[in-house]
Structure formats: C-alpha cells, structure tokens
Image: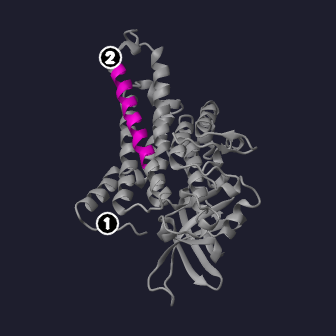
Amino acid sequence: MTKVAVAVAGGESCSPEALVARAAGLVPLLRERAAETERQRRMLDDVRAALHESGLFRIMQPRWADGLELPHPVLVDVASTLARGCPSTAWIYANMAIHAVMVGYFEPAAQREIWGPSPDTLVCMSVIWRDGRARRVAGGYRLSGNWPFCSGISNSEWHMVAAMVEPDSTMAKPEARLFLLPQRDYTVLDNWHVMGLAGSDSRDVTADDVFVPEYRTLADAATLGREAPGIALNPAPLFRIPMQAAAPPTMASVGLGAAQGMLELFVAEIRNRTARYTGRSMAGLQPIQIAVAEAGARLDTARLVLRGSGEEALAIAAAGGVPDLETRLRWRRNAAFGTTLAREAVDILHRRTGGGGLYEAKPLARLWRDFHAVTAHIAFNLDAAAGLYGRHMLGLDVNLTP
C-alpha cells in the first residue's frame, strides 16, 4: 500500500491504511442501510454525511481544495472496502472520487468556482460523447443533450457531461469536449428502475441550449496524460494520468468489493448452517470448503491485477512519462479480467447458497444483483477489452477516439 501521510477534514493526519480502516468502520452502517438505499434508488443522506465526516470523499481531490491527492491504488482499497457493505454507495463514491481528478484538469477558474464555496462539493459525470451536441459561440458554447447513467446525480451540486462540438471555420471535424454544468442548467429524469445497483442513482440528465463559458470546458485530449489547463493548480503526477485508461481498473474495485462482501457473508452464514434434509454441517462439506478457497483465490488475484495497473500509472506519471497505447490497452484488459475473476468467485458462491439465496431481500442476493450490474459496464466486458488489446498486439489498427 502507498505510504503517504495526509491531512483530512478537520486537520487530522491520516495514512492510506487509516483511510481504509475508516472505510471498514462504515461497512456496518452501509450494510444496515443497503436495503433502504436500494428502495430509494439513491445515496441516503445519513450515508453521505458519514462519508463527508470521514474525509473519504476527498481522497483524490486537489490539495489546494483541502483534498488528499492520493493515487488510484488507495482508491481501489477504499472503494472495495465500502462495496463490501453497499455496492451502490461504493459505485457513487468511486465515481465522485475520480471526477474530482477530472475537475482538476480544468481551468483554475472552473475549479475555484466548484470548490471555492465548499471543498465538500460533489461532481457527477456522464461521458457518452455522442449523446451531447455543442456549438461554439462568443465566449463559450451552446450545449444540448440527454445523458444516461449519471451515477449519484441526486447528491451532486455539479454535473460534467461530454459532447461533440460541431465543426466551424476554426476546425474541420467534430471535437470531443467535456462541459461542467451547475444544477440550474440541467434537468434530472426519474428513470432509474433497475435490477442491480438500484441505489446508484444513475438517472438521465437533459440540457437544452444552455450556455457554457469556455473556462468550464475541456478538450478530451487534455485527459490523455498531456498538459491540461489545471496543471497550473495541480502539478502532482495524479493529474497527468490518462483518465480513460486509469479509471476502469479503479472502478472495477466496486465489483471486487461486492464479491468480497459476498464471500464474507457466505462464510458467516455457512459456519452455522446445516443441510435442511440431512442435518449435516454445511461447513464440513468439502465442496463448500473448496468453493470458499477458490472464490478467495480469485479475489486475491483480482485485487493484485487492479492495484498493479494503478501503481504502474502513478509510476509513469511521476517519471514525467505518458503511457503508450499498449500500456493503456493492457490496463483496460486488466480491469475487465479482474472483474471476470470476481464474477467467477461470485457465481461459485451463489451456486452454493441453495434456495435461501433466491429471496431478493437477503443481503447475499442483493450483492449478487449489484455485482452483476457492475459487470454490465462496457469497461468490464472482457471480450471487448481483450479484443482491443489482442488486435493491437497483432499489429492491427485500434481506434480509441470518442
């Protein structure tokens, strides 16, 4: 684990190990509130307050905004720990943490507008480029669009969206660009009714011909490990890491944590469980013992894979480098492969929960649903990620543009 001492909210000095311990301390609350989170389809107010009080929301926030600027491997550990209690909450949390880095790429004026009033401000995001349309006007852009999967939108004060800018006399082809919007500039649709990650609050957002000043926009190219406008405020290596490549292994930590939580609950339940017809101890059955071992081995391996990508990303950025295409594709592959290992672990356990595992209100069933909702994300599709990596390694062209 990265050895860094940091100051959290309230001035208390804290190491990454202590932050993980704080996250572990919240797991009982998250488990207690998981069913209500699922019912309300959003992060609950008391859960958000607890995360703010813990200082965990600021894990990757710039130091100038009272943040910790900790690297991706620490977020993997913290987010996976929170996911043991409630994957929906952890999904929102991990997204918000990564979005803080993204905001750190923007012009200093945009960062100050967001965090100047309060360092507790949260920013949501949707990066489906072709769902947004923008045109250049004097001083900025006019933006319209309908963006899905805006996780944590009800708990966000700002929203970051992606759009393609129409060509004009200054550019020959559409340009991919990010836009920061305050709450007054967008409408949230109540359309998040799903079977898993129901509490992730991943609703649609719409905007209709709103004006966005130039300083609250960012070219996609600035997120690829090159010089971004925000470097003037945030010179740390964290803000030189290509987000499109580094985010998937980090977000995969939520699935890893959900699987770990399922293993913990499975073991706790099986220890005292007897077979309904024979009365034999379930813990004494060798197939159960092997299942626990195999699931645990897969999760341990997945964690190494996911943390390894983050550690490599930080090392490259700290040395002043930019990862080449092979490295970025390998990180994507690793995110999907780590998630695949976790899925195998989850399904090994679920097959042995018996009829009791079918009740939708049971925590094990909720974790299973939430985990499989995580795997629906394209970033964790092994066929897609491995196909890109294999294509490149075989000397064929790979197109990663929006």
Q: What is the number of the mark on residue 398?
A: 1
Q: Nearer the viewer, residue 315 or 166?
A: 315
Residue found at x 53% / y 42% = 2
Residue found at x 57% / y 61% = 102
Residue 284 picture location, percent across and down: 37, 12
Residue 74 picture location, percent across and down: 54, 44
Q: Nearer the viewer, residue 290 or 347?
A: 290
Residue pointed to by mark 2: 286
Q: Circle 2 — which element?
A: helix
Magenta-drawn segment? 288-309
- Quadrant of residue 98 in the image? bottom right
The local crowd at label 2, few if under 14, some if 14 to 19, many if 20 or more residues have their Cα within 10 Å, is: few
Q: Nearer the viewer, residue 106 or 319?
A: 319
- Quadrant of residue 204 in the image? bottom right
Q: Circle 1 — which element?
A: loop
**Left or right placement of residue 276 versus residue 100 in this view:** left
Identify residue type, mark 1.
Val
Query: Residue pushed farthest left?
Result: 394
Q: Earlier in the sequence, mark 1 or mark 2?
A: 2
Task: Report the magenta stretch's main SS.
Answer: helix
Question: Does the magenta portion include 305?
Answer: yes
Residue found at x 59% / y 51% = 97
Q: Can you say whether 233 is above or below 288 in the image?
A: below
Specify the color scheme.
one colour
Q: CA distance from mark 1 to mark 2?
A: 47 Å
Query: Residue pushed farthest bottom?
Result: 169
